[in-house]
Amino acid sequence: MADKKTNYSADNITALEGLEAVRLRPGMYIGSTDEKGLHHLVYEVLDNSIDEHMAGYCSHINLYVNEDNSISVTDNGRGIPTGMHQKLQKSALEVVMTVLHAGGKFDKQTYQVSGGLHGVGVSCVNALSMHLKAEVHREGKVFVQEYSKGIPQTSVDVVGETDKSGTTITFLPDDSIFSDTVYSYETLSKRLRELSYLNKGLHLSITDHRQIDEEGNSVHETFYSEGGLLEFVEHIDLQSGREVLVRPPVHVTGEQENVIVEVAFQYNKSYRENIRSYVNNINTVEGGTHVNGFRRAITHVLKKYGDSKELFSKAKVKNQ
């Protein structure tokens, strides 16, 4: 029974400002503070660069695992805007890096499709990092701002000139929050390979400065796909060693009410179903209406064909 003498008043209400809530309850924003949550930080930064590609402005994304186990993600997109945000009276770069739910993805004109909307954003990555540096190449200038635990340590400074455009985010996870701060090369490279199939025509690479190959260079891999989902399906079956029954994979695309749907699949001799579904590059591991709709549609088509060819007439089990 609760203590009757305990008072519950306005003084018991805590209002957290800025990114304090993220640091106080990180699991609410990234799911966990173990290895899975640690890698989620990288995916959040990657999502921003992927969104630039999906908008038609980015062709190359490079991921670096640095010697101190920090991460750098660089792209050749448009670069995060650095001009003054009229409402908050600070640089748009600082707004994006320090304010939850801030960014161009809430402006329908900037991004029609966005994977980052499903995540927590780079501001949460900033809050959970001991140190983060944002470097933006835009409008002929190089802009830099540094942060610690989400708090700006410098102003947005112009440090040079450039003829390129893009953004580089370098961050070091806070070891006081994460139980594990060592990144897995295999986990990161697997995600980049997946993203290359989901975003055909995009060049991705990973360089691990912690590992040196036989030639004395940092371990490095590049990923690129022209076929997209069709190649993804072939890769999955090749890895599993299953005997394929349909070659090449069935590949269908369509658009209705500004929603683009793409499906690729092939049959093999395995009796085990393997469906991977994605929405805006995000793996919907629990399925959803898009998966249910696909199952109903393909069942309907196959049943209609089977009935027309009388393939089920001798079946012992009645086909519903």
Image (tube, rainbow, N blue to C red):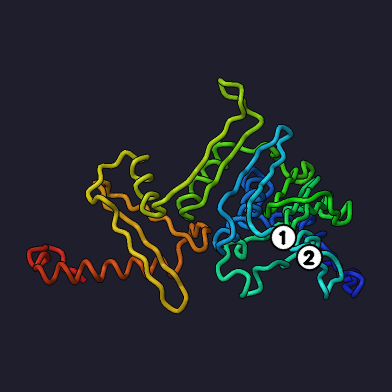
Label 1 sits on a secondary structure element that is loop
Q: Residue 89 at x, y = what percent?
A: 87, 70
- The answer to whether one can see residue 208 in this image is yes
Q: Residue 223 at x, y = what percent?
A: 50, 43
Q: Could you tell whether 278 is left or right of 206 in the image?
A: left
Closest to the observer: 42 or 170?
170
Gap between marks 2 and 1 measured at Cα: 8 Å
Label 2 sits on a secondary structure element that is helix
Few, some or many residues within 10 Å of mark 2 (<14, 14–19, 20+)? many
When the figure is inspected, residue 283 is found, relative to residue 213, above or below; the finding is below
Q: Residue 79 at x, y = what percent?
A: 69, 58
Few, some or many residues within 10 Å of mark 1 (<14, 14–19, 20+)? many
Reading the image, the residue beneath label 2 is 92
Cβ atoms under marks 2 and 1 closer than 8 Å: yes
Q: Residue at x 31, y 70 (%)?
A: 297
Location of residue 180 by image quarter? top right
Location of residue 238 by image quarter? top left
Which of the numbered marks, if any, corresponds to residue 80? 1
Q: Could you tell whether 199 is left or right of 313 in the image?
A: right
Q: Residue at x 52, y 40 (%)?
A: 222
Q: Which amino acid, mark 2?
A: Ala
Q: Which amino acid, mark 1?
A: Ile
Q: Could you tell whether 35 is left or right of 225 in the image?
A: right
